Structure formats: structure tokens, C-alpha cells
């Protein structure tokens, strides 16, 4: 039956649906096997309409997944129209161009049936601890090197997992129990979203989600259009430089505001490269929309309506719109620049909401080896740089952005791998100086306590001086990062062998400062020195 929703009822129901996906996310964390989900929150839980338009996303989900998961569900529908689905079916893929842009992210979705009809989808994405292939690094040349590619398929039929799929997946990964454990945690989240949504629909005597979703989408779209309309019409341009590989990679953005719509064009961006830092268009769109929402509409929860007035394009074959068989395992090293570029462009129209550049993309160490028992192992651990300062306050220390992945705790690093953490501390003099100081990065030293070598690779960016996080309004750049193996800086974009007893230290970048350093409050400068954020030699 159809039903109208007054504002109070709508708010209650919308909050209820967000609570449903939040509860599913909590269940996923509790039942997961890997530190990636359990400690670092590299996953998402999403609720969509029957045709794959997002309605609610778990609060602690990765921002990029707010846009990629609904697109993946629409790809599922292209392969499996509604009439081919049955209760208990679950679809799966990790296809780069249908999913999130790299193979470790496994996307699954379950159609929610009511009275024999699909009324919604429960979706989940999670970064698997391993997907086979070579250890994840920026120097893979094509997608075929990066691991097992899972085509769009039914991983569960009528509630029963495909045994052939499970055998293939287990055979291709180094930690099969962790990988399958996390996948079953995703299935748990899907079942919880399904059961809670069916209870809500029954309670409200609704035979479809469409009317409620349409009301949420319409109100969210109106709010975004109103926010865009408040901006002056015109073109706003920005650019960024990443470390790249042998040469830096240049990124360009033109943001055009016209009435209540925004077009974002990445023309002028460098072409894709024969390494794994390429970004698929879905990931570019996702982080573009996130950057715009963070500035223009931060208090409205993620849903399809927020994205309706935003139009994104990037040249086909560019590093922000890659084509097969481009590798994408390290796509965050480029893709995480996107929301920062959006904010840089918008800062011309809204300087009061701008922040200096962040010491991101987030950093990650990937490792693989063989334990003393002869059993192979693999894992990855995250670490963050400093946040950018604003005109109101200093940047936060060691904070992930634009992704909201947490730094892996020392205890988990040592429990889940044969690495010993010699030290983990805040970096001196890493945050950019300014009226408000940029957040500082961290230094973490890892020693191989295994009796055999470990292969390590890194997701590390902003290591070139020209790619350091830039300050704003006269603020200074944050310190670039570095990867130091046995006391010597090394190329962070290639694999390295860490022999028994050897040590690798990762220095994550600092965030940019805001405003001239000479204007910093003397008490704040004294506190910086006392807290160890800066040394006396570096003080202005």
C-alpha cells in the first residue's frame, strides 16, 4: 500500500534504516577474521532500492563505497534481471570496472524479497586480506598480475554457497581461512540487513521501499541543489601533483557551477600508466561526490539523491578513467587526491570552508612470506599522515582522510604477523607551519622476526618534495614522507625483501599549514614545542 511521510515520520524511518546498516556493520566487525575489517574498518554496508539506488549507508563505511556499491548492484541487475533471482541468492564480483577499482575489494549483494518480489538490496564491500597474485604493490603492470578476478556470478543460490567458487578462491589465496571468514562476515551483514528491513516494512505496513526512498532522495536532492545554488556561477580550476612513478603524475580539475548543478571535468589529467596506480571512473566519481558533499552538505547522510545534481567526467584512458587491462591495486595513491582537488577548487568560492592539503593518501604496508611451519601468510597494515589545517584550527595528527581507515594497532601487527614494532611515534616537524599548524605524521619501525625473508611493498605517497601536502593562505607545506630500509631511503613504489633481523621505517607525511607562520599565537607555539610536535630548530 502507498503511504505519505510527514517530516517527523520520515526522519524516524530514515534514522531507523541507518541504524539497520550500522547494526549490520557491527555484526560484520564482530564476525570478521582479518584486521582489515576488524581493526581498520575497510568495508561498507549499504541498503538500496530494488533498482540499485542507495538509501542508507553504515556510518563508519568507507566514503568511496557510498557510490561504488550501488553501481555494482546495477551491474548485477544487468547480468541477473530481477526475474532470474530467488530468495537466498547472493551475487558477487571484484571486477575493477564494476566494483571499487581494485581486486582486493569483494562486493556482495543480496536481493530482499517480500511476497515474492524484490523490494530492496542489501550490499557489502570489504577489502579481503588476500586475493592471490603477486603481493599488492604499485609496480604491477596489468590487472592479470594482481590476483583472482571474480566475474559477476551467484556465489550463493537459495542460501547455499557455490562449493566450486569456494574451492577456487581458497586455492588462489595465501590465507584462505581469513579470506573466507571475512566473506562469511559479509554474508552475515547481508542477512541482518534483510531481516531488519523486512521487519520494518511489515511494521509500517509497506509493500515496497520505493515510496520511502523516493521521499528521501527528493529531499536530499533539493538540499544539495540549494547548497549548489548558493555558490556563484562560474568555473573553478585546481591541479595536483602526485609522486607518480619515474615521473610525477599531474591531475587537473575544472568545476563548473551553473544554477543548481555542478559539472566536474578532469580534462588535462595525465594518461593511465602501465602500473597499478590507475583509477576506474566509478572510484573517481565516488570521491568527487564525497568531496562535494563534505563541503556543501556535510550533515545529510549518504544516499542517491545527494549525487543527482553532480555530473562527473574524465577522459577515457586517463589515469582517472582507466581502461582494461590496466592495473589498479594501488588506485588510492591517485584517487585520494580527488576530494582534495574538489576542495581546492571550491576554496575559491568558499574560502571559509577550505582546509590545507592532507598528508594523504593513507599509507599501507603489505607483506607476504612463509612461517616456520611452512605455511604461507600475508597481511596488510594501515597507517595515516597528518590532516590539513583550516582557518579555525590546527590539523589533526595521524588522521585518515578522505578514507576513514584506522591505523592498525601495534598489538594486532605483532599478533597477526612475524613483525616486531621497534617504535611508533609522532614525527617531529612534519606538520606545515602556519597561523594554524598542519597535523603531524607518524614514524613506525618494523623488524622482521621471521626466520625467513618477507616480501614487503607499500602504498606510500607524497614522498617527493613537489608532492608534499601544500599549505593554504600562506601556510607552509607539510613534510613529505619516506620509506627507509636498513637506514637508507628506498623507492616506495616497488617490492622489497626484508631479511631476518632487518628493519623498515615508514615516515608518513604531515598536513599543510594555514596562514602565515609569523601570525601563530605565542602560547600555541610554546605548546607545540612542549608537546614535541616541533623542535626548537624548526620554530619560526
Image (tube, rainbow, N blue to C red):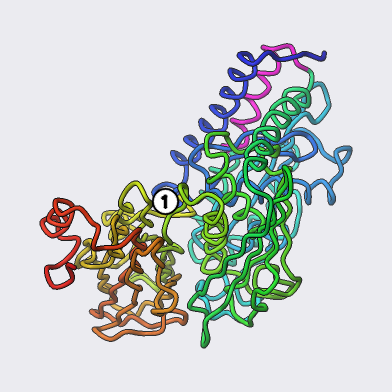
State whether the magenta stretch is mostly helix, strand or loop. Answer: helix
- Name the residue: 23% across, 56% down: 520
Q: Residue at x 52, y 81 (%)?
A: 248
Work out whether 83 lies above or below 529: above
- Please provide percent x and percent y for residue 58: 54, 37
Quadrant position of the C terminus in the picture: bottom left
Location of the N terminus by quadrant is top right
Magenta extent: 188-206
Q: Nearer the viewer, residue 476 or 201?
A: 476
Magenta stretch: includes residue 197: yes
Q: Is residue 271 left or right of residue 4?
A: left
Q: Is residue 394 left or right of residue 171?
A: left
Q: Please determine whether, in this image, residue 135 is positioned above or below residue 494.
A: above
Q: Residue at x 73, y 46 (%)?
A: 261
Q: Secondary structure at mark 1?
A: loop
Q: Which residue is mark 1?
A: 40
Tell me residue 421's x, y (percent): 23, 65
Amino acid at each position: 500500500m502507498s503511504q505519505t511521510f510527514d517530516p517527523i515520520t520520515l526522519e524516524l524511518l530514515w534514522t531507523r534504516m541507518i541504524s539497520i546498516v550500522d547494526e549490520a556493520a557491527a555484526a560484520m566487525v564482530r564476525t570478521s577474521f582479518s584486521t582489515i575489517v576488524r581493526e581498520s574498518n575497510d568495508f561498507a554496508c549499504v541498503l538500496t532500492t530494488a533498482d540499485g539506488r542507495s538509501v542508507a549507508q553504515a556510518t563508519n563505511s568507507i566514503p568511496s563505497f557510498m557510490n561504488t556499491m550501488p553501481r555494482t548492484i546495477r551491474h548485477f541487475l544487468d547480468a541477473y534481471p530481477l526475474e532470474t533471482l530467488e530468495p537466498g541468492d547472493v551475487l558477487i564480483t571484484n571486477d575493477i570496472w564494476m566494483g571499487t577499482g581494485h581486486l582486493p575489494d569483494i562486493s556482495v549483494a543480496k536481493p530482499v524479497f517480500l511476497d515474492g518480489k524484490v523490494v530492496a538490496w542489501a550490499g557489502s564491500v570489504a577489502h579481503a586480506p588476500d586475493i592471490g597474485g603477486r603481493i599488492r604493490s604499485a609496480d604491477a603492470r596489468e590487472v592479470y598480475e594482481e590476483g583472482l578476478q571474480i566475474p559477476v556470478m551467484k556465489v550463493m543460490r537459495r542460501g547455499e554457497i557455490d562449493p566450486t567458487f569456494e574451492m577456487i578462491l581458497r586455492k588462489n589465496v595465501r590465507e584462505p581461512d581469513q579470506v573466507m571468514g571475512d566473506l562469511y562476515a559479509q554474508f552475515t551483514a547481508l542477512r541482518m540487513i534483510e531481516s531488519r528491513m523486512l521487519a520494518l516494512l511489515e511494521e509500517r505496513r509497506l509493500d515496497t521501499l520505493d515510496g520511502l526512498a523516493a521521499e528521501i532522495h527528493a529531499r536530499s536532492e533539493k538540499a544539495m541543489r540549494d547548497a549548489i545554488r548558493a555558490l556563484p556561477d562560474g568555473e573553478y580550476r585546481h591541479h595536483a601533483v602526485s609522486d607518480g612513478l619515474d615521473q610525477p603524475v599531474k591531475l587537473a580539475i575544472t568545476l563548473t557551477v551553473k544554477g543548481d548543478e555542478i559539472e566536474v571535468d578532469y580534462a588535462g589529467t595525465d594518461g593511465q600508466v602501465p602500473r597499478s596506480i590507475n583509477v576506474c571512473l566509478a572510484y573517481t566519481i565516488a570521491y568527487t561526490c564525497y568531496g562535494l558533499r563534505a563541503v556543501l552538505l556535510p550533515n545529510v547522510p549518504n544516499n542517491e539523491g545527494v549525487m543527482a545534481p553532480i555530473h562527473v567526467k574524465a577522459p577515457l584512458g586517463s589515469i582517472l578513467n582507466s581502461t582494461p587491462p590496466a592495473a589498479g591495486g594501488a588506485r588510492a595513491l591517485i584517487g585520494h587526491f580527488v576530494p582534495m582537488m574538489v576542495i581546492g577548487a571550491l576554496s575559491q568560492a568558499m574560502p571559509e570552508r577550505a582546509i590545507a592539503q592532507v598528508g594523504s593518501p593513507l599509507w599501507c604496508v603489505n607483506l607476504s612470506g612463509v612461517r616456520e611451519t611452512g605455511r604461507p601468510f600475508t597481511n596488510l597494515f594501515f597507517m595515516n599522515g597528518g590532516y590539513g589545517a583550516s582557518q579555525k584550527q590546527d590539523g589533526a595528527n595521524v588522521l585518515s582522510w578522505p578514507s576513514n581507515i584506522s591505523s592498525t594497532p601495534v598489538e594486532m601487527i605483532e599478533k597477526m604477523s612475524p613483525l616486531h614494532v621497534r617504535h611508533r611515534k609522532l614525527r617531529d616537524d612534519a606538520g606545515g607551519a602556519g597561523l594554524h599548524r598542519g597535523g603531524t605524521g607518524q614514524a613506525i619501525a618494523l623488524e622482521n622476526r621471521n626466520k625467513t625473508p618477507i616480501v614487503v611493498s607499500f602504498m606510500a605517497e607524497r614522498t617527493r618534495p613537489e608532492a608534499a601536502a601544500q599549505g593554504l593562505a600562506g601556510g607552509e607545506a607539510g613534510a613529505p614522507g619516506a620509506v627507509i630500509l636498513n637506514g637508507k631511503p628506498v623507492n616506495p613504489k616497488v617490492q622489497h625483501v626484508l631479511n631476518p633481523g632487518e628493519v623498515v621505517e615508514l615516515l608518513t607525511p604531515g598536513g599543510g599549514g594555514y596562514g602565515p607562520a609569523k601570525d601563530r599565537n605565542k602560547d600555541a607555539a610554546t605548546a607545540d614545542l612542549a608537546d614535541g610536535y616541533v623542535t626548537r630548530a624548526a620554530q619560526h
